[in-house]
Every structure is written in C-alpha cells, then in structure tokens.
Amino acid sequence: MSDEREDVLDAMDWLLDSLEDDDAVSYAEVGGVYQEKTDLVVTGDGPRETTEFTETGVWLRVFADGAADYRYTNSLEEEALTDVADRAIRSGEVLAQEEPGRFDAYTSHRGTHGGWASEGIHTRDLEEKTSVVEAGLAAADDLDLDRQWANYSDAHVEEAVGTTTGSVVRTTLDRARVDFSLTLADGPKVSRHAGSTEGAAFLEEVTDVFETAAADARALSNADSADAPTGETTVALSPEAAGQLFHFVSHYLEADTGYMGMSPYAVGDRIGPEDLAIEDAVHAGSWAARAYDAEVKPTTPTQLVSNGRVERLLHNTTTAAEEDAYPAGNSVPSLGFTEPPRIHARHLEVATGDADAAALREDADVYVERFKKPWFRDEFERVQRQGVFPASALYAKDIDRKSIDSPDCGSAEFPLAEAYRLEDGERAGRLDGVSIEYAPDVLRTVSRIGEARETVTGTCEKHKSQIPFAVTAPGVRLDAPIVDEN
C-alpha cells in the first residue's frame, strides 16, 4: 500500500477515535478518500487542458445537539483534522434545529466492494483518453459548427468509511464521464453527458455517444424551423426526454423535499396511469451506482411507484426513522465529496409499455428528443433548491415552519432543446424557443408508454451538492401546454 493511502487511513482512524471520545458527539461517520484523477478539455482546435493528479482527503458527518454537519478537508495533519471536527460540532450545536436528528446506533455493517470495473480507468494513460475524445468530436467534422467542446474527467476512487457505532466498509469505484456540446451555426446547441463506473470499458463505448450526437445535430441542421402549436398539446417524448422528466419527478419523492413543503406528492397518491411503475435500482457499472451509501448502508432497490401510485419515498437513516421505514442506501455522496451527501435516487428504472415508436407519435403534435434544464415556477422552490442546506434532513421541517404556502411548488417549464413539429406522425420542422409546462398532474395524462428504453445520465445539483443520476426509461405520450420560453 502506498504512503498516501496509508496516510488517508491513519487520518480517518485518528479522527474517528477523536470523535468517539468527544462527549458532544452523539454519532459520526468518517471517510478517507484516495483518488487518481484525470481532467481534460478538448475543443475544435484540439486539446486545451490535460491534467492527471492524485487527491487525498477526509470527510466527516457529525451529529451534535440533534443536528448534523458535514466537512471535507484535503489536509491530513492532526491540527487541521481537529479544526474541521470542532467546526462540525459547533455548527451542529448552533443550528438550533427544533427536532433532533436520528441515526442508526444499533446496526453495524462491515464489508468490502471492489467496484464494477474489470480494468480500472486509471490504468489507461492520458494520451489515450485525449485521443478518444478527439476522435469522438471528429464525428461532427462535416457539420457547420460555431463551437465544439468536450470535458472528460475520471477518478479511480478508493474509499474507507467508519462510524462511531462500529460500521466499517471499503469500496473501490472507477467513475468516468464526458460532457460535450456541438453548437450549430444554423440551429440549436446539442449537449450530451455520458458516464459509467465500468472503468476502462467506458473508453470503448463513448465513441458511439459522440456519433449519435453528431447524427442528431445533423438532423436538426437539415430541418427547417416550424411554428409551434400553442395551448394544450399532445406530446411524444423520446426515451431520453422521458428519462429527464422522470428524474425531475423523482426529486419530489425525496423525503426531505416533502418535509420542506415542496412536494405535491405523498405516499398513496396517484401520479400517473395504472401501468406506470418506477423503481430506484442499483445497476452494476451505472454512472450513478454505488455499493454502499454515505451512511454505510448497502444500496438496495426501492419500488417508488406501482400501478401509477406512490408506494414509497427516498430516505436516509434519519427520515426513515421518522417514517418507520428502512433506509435503502439513498444518502448519496456528492461528486468529489466536498459537499454533503443528499437523499437522492441512484438509477431510476421506468417499466416499459406496449407502444412502438410509431404508436407513440400517432396523433401527437410535437416530438421531443431532449429537454434543457427546467425552470421552476415558484420562487421559494428556486431559492431553496439552489441554496446551501445543512447535512441534517430534519432541518427541512424548520424551513417549512418558517415559510409561507407555495402553491406553485412542483411546477416547472421545460425548454425544448431538440424537438420537432409532427404531421401524421412524421417530423415536419424543428421547434425553437418554446417550453412545455409541467404541473404535478401532467403524468396523469400519459396515454401510451413505449416498448423500448434508453438510458440518460447526468449530474444535478441539490443544495450545492453535485449528485450523479441515471434513468432508464421508455418514451411516453402525454398532454401538456406549450408556451414561449421565459
């Protein structure tokens, strides 16, 4: 074992011992992280930034005076570790949270998970990774582009996590991703994200993502601009667009979102047709996959929606204790570990229906390939989602007590990134500058669910924490108003 890895484990053990001996600490989790990382940027002019580096750090989540606080530091010296621990304890004490947070003081987990990579991403050199991205962008060489840009990054992560109640797990994760965009001179920007925890195998697969994006950009460039329908419209969503929509909906199935008064859904509510079923799964090799969450809970599947009704919410240990439920490993660490873990879905699986692509588009007025980032209609929801939030889920109830009613929570506008007007089920022109209005009852209008699924991946922000997400979904047909973009 390298000296850097040993230093991380020593720092974690020292900090855990210190917190166990502190009477002000009710419970704590401490993680030691060793990462071998790559980051590179490639444009149409070639590589712009290429770096390889090693990063070590320690994170901790501390329960003190009924509230939790989270800290991360790259310094492994005892003085620095003492400082972040003291800050975490003081933060919990001054938060003045009305309801004390709960934690699992009785269940102890011990385990090791070696990841899903047969070959670690760190075994491939920087030159090979750069050439893969360059070759990918070359798939769009025939297009008239104002700009092309790609950011590739990966991390071989070795993490050990211990708790003051005796749980200890060690995991290895090879997480790689690429974000890129093709900005058409005579059309919209085509943006894509692809990610995986399969290690070096990702490099063999990513070329197809570039080629598919180039083909989509080619179709958009060749299409004339069309007038959008107005008002209530029958819309067919591709599997990727449907995946983006279901990811958006999943945020309202997070227990702390409900505690904050921002969710229009509760357990037992009907949110869609009877054949709508959504499961939060753990796919081996998925961009969002983990074996254990930040609370050292094994990640297990969770049925969120059955027969169109909400069956269960997403929990961490604290909210599960409040609702007499069992945590399924949904305390998801942020990418890079610099911000607190959050209650979040891992890999959503939406069950298929029996409609083929033609049936989905039949009698529809608009076909949506992809959405841009949604815009929340309610100002309170926009502020809270973008703002800083403590690593204490029950503090959400304090926010709800201090806030006024927000009837527009759960409503948003989804700008169309790649979409077409339909005539007799066929594409009849590109749509630009319009959005679909989403309200909490829109999923009830789903009239057909597709028989084929695709996976969409990405990174979303929840209270400053960057969280990976993945959704495997079929296309759907639904009714929703179309309006001009804000």
Image (spheres, rainbow, N blue to C red):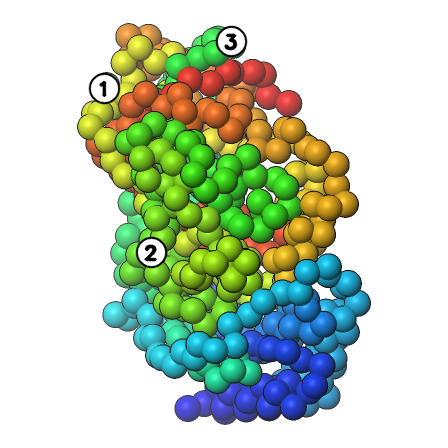
Left-right relation of 91 to 180: right
* Front position in the image: 327 or 31: 327
Residue at the far front: name it. 324
Look at the numbered disc 3 and give the secondary structure of its residue.
Answer: loop
Look at the numbered disc 1 and give the secondary structure of its residue.
Answer: helix
- The residue to which callout 3 is attached is 230
* Residue kind at label 3, given as amino acid type: Thr
* Residue kind at label 2, given as amino acid type: Pro
Compared to 181, does 468 lie above or below? below
How many badges with numbers are in the image? 3
Whether residue 38 is visible: yes
Left-right relation of 106 to 387: left
- The residue to which callout 2 is attached is 301
- Where does residue 251 sit, x and y in percent of width and height? 51, 44
- Where does residue 294 sit, x and y in percent of width and height? 50, 68
* Front position in the image: 265 or 449: 265
Mark 3 / mark 1, whichever is N-terminal:
3
* Residue kind at label 1, given as amino acid type: Ala
Q: Residue at horizontal 75%, vertical 41%? A: 403
Mark 2 / mark 3, whichever is N-terminal:
3
Disc nearest the viewer among 1 and 2: 2
Q: Residues within 10 Å of mark 3 (few under 14, many from 20)?
A: few
Disc nearest the viewer among 2 and 3: 2
